[in-house]
Amino acid sequence: MKGAGEQTEKSFLLEATLRVSPEALERDLPLLAEEWGGFGFVEEGGEVRVIFYLSPEDRERFREACRRYGWEEISFREVPEEDWSSTWRESFKPLRVSSRIWVCPPWERVKTDPGEVEIVIDPGQAFGTGHHPTTALMLEALDRLFREGPPGRVLDLGCGTGILAIAAAKLGAEHVVALDIDPRACQAARENVQRNGVRVEVLSGRIEEIQADFDLILANISAWELRTLAPVLRERLRPGGRLFLSGFLAKEIAEMLEAYRNLDLISRQVRDEWGFLAFRK
């Protein structure tokens, strides 16, 4: 037992911050996050800062993992473990992403006006809070599409936190499927679905294993995956159905247009070096 004059030793987590290019974020970050688990990222003025929380003894192993991708600019600081939760929460504030859609963390809600939609997201170990341009572009496109009338069957491919699937359900889709190959993402999505009180079928696996077809497919994943999956995405899309793509850089748009040349392009947007494309079958 400690004496009255002794203080309990604090335990610390190690906050590691990386500064990476948008190209590296799209290409390499998913691989690093698969190994270490992701916290989140902040994009300011074209610079992306990626933040991980580690055990202090993992400092050198993490630094070496980053060097494999050519990432040398890493800063570390110790964060008292009891303060980690508040530090984490401070980085995620309510965000209005479109005229109707708000994205909020569970610990800071907003009072919505009639017709507005509040999506409550706790990221856990998955990506997707609405703060990154690719997610924001997808949510804005969803808002516009659903004003024309909600599609019947929607697939959110690479669902992460489930944010796009939840948005589709809240906007009025009849049946929504959220699909991801990462079990951690599926768990985060299921928790967020329950948190929002919507009906979304969350599945773990690959789209090749899904035999259903859809009126709307949302795919906010890497350019390489989008190119690879182009044939199966076209196949799973119903005649007249829409396909929303993001997760790639603006300079990769030409490659995306070539991969999906058999579909009709209906929208093309760029924001902060990131691209968005919408097609109709």
Image: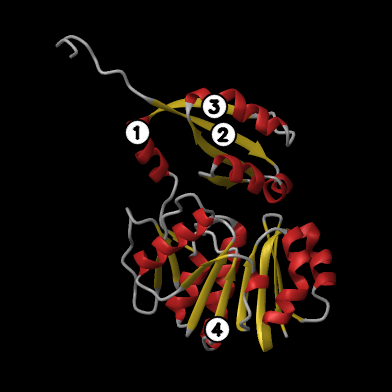
Which secondary structure, mark 4? strand
Q: Which amino acid type corresponds to the residue marked 3 in the rendered image?
A: Asp
Which residue is denoted by mark 3 in the rendering? Answer: 58
Q: Which amino acid type corresponds to the residue marked 4 in the rendered image?
A: Arg
Residue 127 percent coordinates (x, y): 54, 54
Reading the chain from its start, which is encountered first: label 2 or label 1?
A: 2
Question: Pointer 3: residues within 10 angstroms few (<14), some, or many (20+)?
Answer: few
Query: Toward the viewer: 156 or 274?
Result: 156
In 3D space, how far apart are the residues under numbered discs 1 and 4 (Cα atoms)? 43 Å
User: Marks 4 and 2: which is nearer the front?
Assistant: 4
Residue 20 percent coordinates (x, y): 67, 40
Which residue is denoted by mark 1 in the rendering? Answer: 83
Reading the chain from its start, which is encountered first: label 3 or label 2?
A: 2
Q: Quadrant of residue 114?
A: bottom left
Compared with 73, 214 (above or below) is below
Q: Which amino acid type corresponds to the residue marked 2 in the rendered image?
A: Thr
In 3D space, how far apart are the residues under numbered discs 1 and 3 (Cα atoms)? 19 Å
Residue 204 - label: none
Reading the chain from its start, which is encountered first: label 1 or label 3?
A: 3
User: Marks 3 and 2: which is nearer the front?
Assistant: 3
- Residue at 19% in and 13% down: 2
Which residue is denoted by mark 2 in the rendering? Answer: 17
Residue 266 visible at all = no
User: Marks 1 and 3: which is nearer the front?
Assistant: 3
In 3D space, how far apart are the residues under numbered discs 3 and 2 (Cα atoms)? 14 Å
Q: Which residue ends up furthest to the left in the rendered image?
A: 4
Question: Pointer 1: residues within 10 angstroms few (<14), some, or many (20+)?
Answer: few
Total residue callouts: 4
